[in-house]
Amino acid sequence: MILALVVSLGVAVAVIWLALLLTLMGTKPEIGTVREAARIMPDSARLIHRLATDNDLQRGIRLRLWLLLGYLALPLDLVPDFIPVIGYADDVLITSLVLRSVIKRAGTDKVQSQWPGTPEGLNALARLCRLPIA
């Protein structure tokens, strides 16, 4: 009984991972977008950390940011980083989705005040998250 449950869970995880991989391959993120995201990733990581430690934000927002930092720090990814383009696309996709939800809930003023990089980097973040920040 337990063995069947473990096998079923393993198969379900493998199917979900394969579906995510096929989705990322199907969307074929633009190399320029991934490069732009890689360029602002250090500033984005500092932004995420600053927002995660900001006690003015709701606990749910901070928890989401800490989970994102944990995911980015893990050496294992949903899609291994050695796969060209889509290897980093999962990190970019997850980061942009989390930041998009944080920006919508916390407000653009909070993100602008915590942004450690250049205004061009903030504009790039806005494009990646598909939000009008600056």
Image (tube, rainbow, N blue to C red):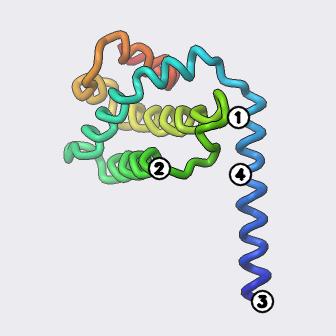
Q: Position of residue 37 (x, y in %)?
A: 48, 23
Earlier sequence position, callout 1 versus callout 3:
3
Q: Position of residue 32 (x, y in %)?
A: 58, 14
Does the residue at mark 4 contact the one at mark 1 (Cβ under 8 Å)?
no
Earlier sequence position, callout 3 versus callout 2:
3
Earlier sequence position, callout 4 versus callout 1:
4
Q: Which residue is mark 4?
A: 17
Disc sitting over residue 6 in the figure: none
Q: Amino acid at mark 3?
A: Met
Earlier sequence position, callout 3 versus callout 4:
3
Earlier sequence position, callout 2 versus callout 1:
1
Q: Which residue is mark 1?
A: 24
Q: Position of residue 102 (x, y in %)?
A: 40, 37
Nearer to the camera, 113 or 94: 94
**Residue at horizontal 53%, vertical 32%?**
92
Q: CA distance from mark 4 to mark 1?
A: 11 Å
